[in-house]
Image (spheres, rainbow, N blue to C red):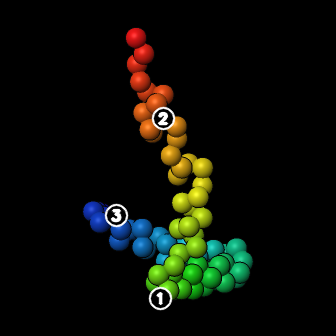
Amino acid sequence: MIKITDHSFAERVVQSKVPVLLAYFVHPGFIALSAFVGAGLVFAGVTDWCGMGLLLAKMPWNQKSACASGSCCEVKH
């Protein structure tokens, strides 16, 4: 039995095989999806600008809440 201790290695294997399997068994368009994601990663690396990172940073769950300032967490006597 193979014991995988490096999770990043396991994740890379899964990420590289899933699109190939989906393209073979489901639809060849999954190869285009993988190429699009890869091109986006290359663009982000070359230009140092990541559109996905900017979109994720603006999502509501990444915003500071009112409680983060401590105003709602105070105990009033």
Q: Earlier in the sequence, mark 1 or mark 3?
A: 3
Which x, y percent locates residue 42?
Answer: 51, 86
- The residue under label 1 is which amino acid type? Val
* Mark linked to residue 7: 3
Q: Of the two numbered discs 2 and 3 on the same chain, state the one appearing first in sequence.
A: 3
Instruction: Give the class, few, some or many, for how many residues have Cα within 10 Å of label 2's Cα (few <14, many ≥20).
Output: few
Label 2 and label 3: CA atoms lie apart by 35 Å
The percent coordinates of residue 4 (x first, y second) are 30, 64
Residue depicted at x 50% and y 86%: 47
Whether residue 26 sits left or right of residue 5 in the image: it is right
**Horizontal and vertical percent position of residue 19:** 58, 76
Does residue 38 show up? no
Q: Nearer the viewer, residue 33 or 42?
A: 42
- CB contact under 8 Å: marks 2 and 3: no
* Nearest to N terminus: mark 1 or mark 2: 1
Measuring 66% from the left and 84% from the top, which residue is drawn there?
A: 32
Res 9 → quadrant: bottom left
* 36 and 29: which is toward the camera: 36
- Camera-side residue of 22 and 12: 12
Q: Residues within 10 Å of mark 1 (few under 14, many from 20)?
A: few
Percent x, y of residue 44 = 51, 81
Q: Is residue 69 left or right of residue 54?
A: left
Rounded to the nearest whole Å, what is the CA distance between mark 1 and mark 3?
Answer: 27 Å
Residue hosting label 1: 46
Question: Mark 2 = which residue?
Answer: 67
* The C terminus: image quadrant: top left
Task: State the residue in front, 68 or 23.
Answer: 68
In the depicted structure, whether residue 34 falls above or below residue 2: below
Image: 43 above or below 57? below
